[in-house]
Image (cartoon, helix red, strand yellow):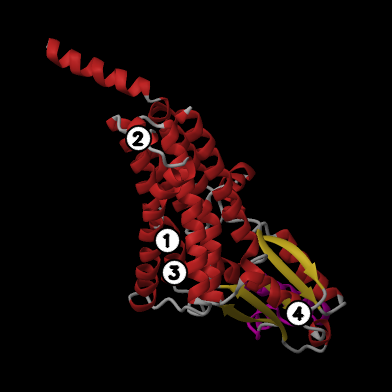
Amino acid sequence: MRAFLTVVRNEITLILRDKVYLLLLTVGGVSTLVTLAYTLSTDIEDVRTLVVNLDAGQHSRRFVQALANDRFFDLEMAAHRDEAENSLQDGSVRVAVVIPADYSRSIDRGETAQVQVLIDGSEPGVAVLAESHVLAIAGSASQQLAMEVVERQGVAGRGVMGSRSRVVLNARVGYNADLKTVLGVVPGLMGIVLIVPAVGASAAFARERERGSFEVVASTPLGRWPLLLGRVFPYVLVGLFDIGIFTAIARLAFGVPLRGGLGLFVVLGCVYIFATASSGVLIAQFSRSQHGAAIITFELFGIAPTYLSNIFFPVASMPLWLQWLSASLPATHFTAIARGIFLKGVGWEVLWPNVLALLAMGTLTSMLAYVRFRKKLG
């Protein structure tokens, strides 16, 4: 029994010494529970939707008002159809509704009026719900028009209600016409599996400290930056190899189209690895064990992005604090980059905000890691 208590006391002492690991064991589970609860219990709402109303009649205004009354949509108005196409491509909106100029005139003539709906299929779950919501609004509009005919002409209600629809949707899903979930998920998952270099870099730095060889390495005539970069660079090479393998798997095994430039994806993948690896090195500066450093890095950049980077759940429907948390994760920006290059074929002109965010994260964390590293050497 005395031996058992000795081991327990020794283990508790080790845990208490590693403040970062202790924080993970105590606060990490609570934060994960709260975040998951908010994520999984949030109904999809406030999907960014652009409405192009080319008709000035009362029927089109009524249709727009019906869209505004549905909490699923967060409406923005535009004057030209080209704005709808551009907004879908750059990801600023997920749905675009185009009401033609003859919409009200067709209804007044007793003809069928058409509404075009353009949907971003890179997030299949949101796309399916968006189409069903607009379809329900169109059906409600048709039913209301039929009831007005009944009241105006005194026709038998049942006969009119069984007639053809007065408002018909012309839906077009872009970038993933068949709404295959795998096409939207696989590019995003690349960001999750590409955190392996970050975990490796974090564990490598923490290993030197855990084994007591950190002082020996630090006493060499090498400068601080060569020590930092020399430790990280091999893991960047591993990540570069992984990018090639993952791209081949996405194309050959899952049939994900590569509509953009492969070279651009490789370059931006390296930027993402730079951001995550720098963060992993910073975490290692505060952890006393490679085990703790690896777990914390994987928790922050592997588990959290699974439900906070728009891969499976739309972040726009989450509470504001979760949206800010999502924006601070490198995987969120890499998901937008991967989907943009693979599914939409976009380039720098669209992806630069995400690239800038990754560069800012990588630069900030690498500078903080350098300062912490310099303090240790001092």
> Disc 2 residue type?
Gly
Farthest front residue in view: 221
The disc at residue 81 is 4
Residue that badge 1 annotates: 189
Mark with earlier residue (3, 4): 4
The quadrant the N terminus occupies is: top left
Mark with earlier residue (3, 1): 3
Task: Return the residue nearer the eye: 20 or 315.
Answer: 20
Is label 2 in contact with label 4 (beta carbons under 8 Å)? no
Q: Is residue 154 left or right of residue 128?
A: right
Q: Which secondary structure, mark 4?
A: helix
The disc at residue 181 is 3
**What is the x, y in percent for residue 335?**
51, 61
What is the crowding at mark 4: few (fewer than 14 residues within 10 Å), some, or many (at least 20)?
some
Is label 2 in contact with label 3 (beta carbons under 8 Å)? no
Residue that badge 2 annotates: 292
| Residue interval drawn in magenta | 135-164
